[in-house]
Image (cartoon, rainbow, N blue to C red):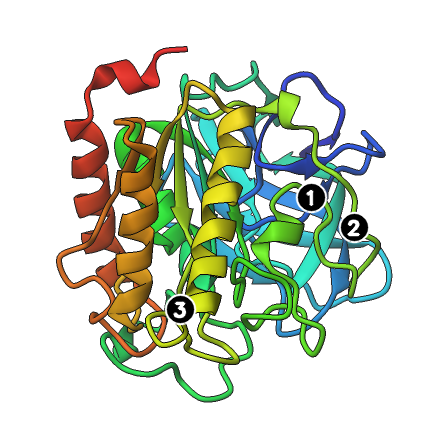
Amino acid sequence: MSKLSIKMNDPRLAFIGRVDFTDPLKPMFTWPGSSVELKAVAEKISVKIKNYRNCYHNYVGISVNGEDPKKTEITELKEETEVVLIDGLDATKESRITIYKPMDAAHFYEISEIILEAKDEEAELLEKPELPARRMEVFGDSVSAGEVSEAVEYVGKPDPEGHEGIYSNSWYGYSFMTARKLGAQLYDEAQGGAALFDKTGWFHGPDFVGMETIYNKLRFNDQIMPMTDWDFARYTPHVVVIAIGQNDANPENYMGNDEEKSKKWKDGYKKFIETLREKYPKAQFILTTTILCHSKEWDDAIDEVAKSFNDKKVQHFLYTNNGTGTPGHIRKPEAEVMSDELSAFINSLGEEIWQD
């Protein structure tokens, strides 16, 4: 039996997403899809993990060589615990391992060790994986986070009642599907229920918090622990997808019905885009929503804002069945179609959008 414990500051580990390195030996994973990647020879892979629960069942995910992932529930909610992520790998071959966060701010977790084991071979950590040169970032809501994406029996239907997060998986969100098809890294700043403005949407109830507050955060849910700021110098995307405007109708669907409130939203939305463009002046921006059922007036407002820039670096994108596809969250097959359409649109913008 061979066993190898890997500390989280090992230079052979690669991280994607807004990972909190306040303690480099215990990096904290907060945003959906944030991950650590490694190349290894092992039969069994475990992690030492401490979970900070907000709601729902909580999970950690693992994918081997980019294949469909496996989720493991974190049942210990107070102390660090060792969790087996996968067993039965072929220890005679090299594997590329992705350990990732399937959920949004239903929880945060920190990992202190990755443990590799093999019965008949020598468990080994190999060279650091090379990350894609293309870089994407998404600012969105539950659809961009892959919430309830595994409920494939509910395609085109409302969500199953009382799902408690068991069907959520960022891996099957359209955003990560798109990034994989384009061969790009993805930082996914997506949170279920998020609208643009504070006091609207569904996130962080009853004191709702919007994207205007959390877009620049690392720890972004103070119902778990105090918020902290993100250092934008750590990551500069080539392509930025803004996918908000679906939760903004709560508590009032005023777009197109109240001129003053509609103008305030459009002005705030434009200011949000301008703020991000100041941080990413070379990036291609794509403004959109999703196929989740919502009032067309929100897409019309986004189109108006996009045109006001009069800049090919700011594009409005609509899916074939935008806003009319499903009354529930987007399931894996629906996300697949969305990612086909979105990746085709991004490809149509030319290779030059990926240049630094």
Q: List the residue tagged with mark 2.
A: 227
Farthest residue in the bottom direction? 161
Earlier sequence position, callout 2 versus callout 1: 1
Vertical relation: 239 (above or below) 71: above
Question: Which image quarter holds the C terminus?
Answer: top left
Residue 95 in which image quadrant:
top left
Task: Choose between 356 and 23: the one closer to the eye.
Answer: 356
* CA gap, disc 3 and disc 2: 34 Å
Frontmost of labels 3 and 2 is: 3
- Tell me if residue 31 can be seen: yes
| CB within 8 Å, label 3 to label 1 | no
* CA gap, disc 2 and disc 1: 7 Å
Q: List the residue tagged with mark 3.
A: 259
* Number of marks present in the image shown: 3
- Tag 3 secondary structure: helix
Vertical relation: 266 (above or below) 153: above
Task: Choose between 116 and 129: the one closer to the eye.
Answer: 129
Q: List the residue tagged with mark 1.
A: 217
Earlier sequence position, callout 3 versus callout 1: 1
- Tag 2 secondary structure: loop
- Tag 1 secondary structure: loop
Report the amino acid beneath label 1. Answer: Lys
Q: Is 52 on the left-hand or right-hand side of 31?
A: right
Task: Choose between 255 and 191: the one closer to the eye.
Answer: 255
Report the amino acid beneath label 3. Answer: Glu
Q: Residues within 10 Å of mark 2 (few under 14, many from 20)?
A: some
Q: Is 87 on the left-hand or right-hand side of 114?
A: left
* Residue at horizontal 50 percent and vertical 19 percent from the top: 129
| CB within 8 Å, label 2 to label 1 | yes
